[in-house]
Amino acid sequence: MSTGGSAIRGSRVGAGPMGEQDRGFKAERITISYYCSAGHEYSPQYAASVDAAEIPEMLDCPSCGLPAGQDKANPPIIAKHEPYKTHLAYVKERRTASEAKELLEEAVAAVRERRIRLAEEAKVAAKEAAKAATKKASAAAKAAAKPAAKAVVAKEEKKPAAKAKAPAKPVAKTPAKTTAKPATKSKAAPSAKTAKKK
């Protein structure tokens, strides 16, 4: 009667053949132990054919993540963690004080030259703008003077004709009226009265 288990005891489905001699050749290995500052030990195995220079001196401990070294008495210690470094700190790591001074002098000289050049260009541009403004102003003044001169000439041409016409009309009318009316009234009336009285 079958129990539903495997016919061969000590094996499972998908397992290799029983016995070490059938599993193939086992390569030679070396075991190196690493120790972290928390007291953990980690012992990975490397092939014996690997060069000693290729084996890392430090690894991260799989238990705590701290660096682990091969010396149990002196495990590696984490340096003070600096989450942020300024730009100046990185520059100081790369350059000495004398190199930094030379670079600063070069940069300041370049800025000075650029400012002098820009100031000269601005002066030239200001002079050109002033010349253009004076030309525009003179052209506008000439354009405004031409219609004014034409208007003055036209007024001068019209004025003599108007002066000649205006005095001729009043002179002819006024003396005739003043001389005719008073003369008839003053001389005719008294002479008739005086004639009747006499």
Image (cartoon, rainbow, N blue to C red):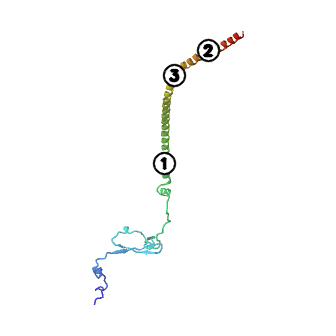
Q: State if disc 3 and disc 2 touch (CB < 8 Å).
A: no
What's the CA distance linking mark 2 and mark 3? Answer: 36 Å
Q: Which amino acid does label 1 sit on?
A: Ala
Number of the label disc, if any, that sits on residue 158: 3
Q: What residue type is labelled 3?
A: Lys
Number of numbered markers? 3
Give the mark, 3 or 1, whose residue is nearer the N terminus.
1
Number of the label disc, if any, that sits on residue 180: 2
Categorize mark 1 by other alpha carbons within 10 Å: few (<14), some (14-19), many (20+): few
Q: Nearer the viewer, mark 3 or mark 1?
A: 3
The location of residue 5, given as percent across then percent down, is 30, 86
Give the mark, 2 or 1, whose residue is nearer the N terminus.
1
Quadrant location of the C terminus in the rendered image: top right
* Left or right relative to 3: residue 58: right
Give the mark, 2 or 3, whose residue is nearer the N terminus.
3
The single residue placed furthest to the top in the displayed view is: 198
The residue to which callout 1 is attached is 107
Residue 172 versus residue 118 in the image, above or below: above
The location of residue 45, given as percent across then percent down, is 37, 74
Say what secondary structure mark 2 lies in.
helix
What's the CA distance linking mark 3 and mark 1? Answer: 77 Å
Q: Nearer the viewer, residue 2 or 31?
A: 2
What's the CA distance linking mark 2 and mark 1? Answer: 109 Å
Q: Which of marks 2 and 3 is in front?
A: 2
Residue at left 49%, top 52%?
100
Residue at left 48%, top 39%?
121
Say what secondary structure mark 3 lies in.
helix
Residue 112 versus residue 92 in the image, above or below: above
Say what secondary structure mark 1 lies in.
helix
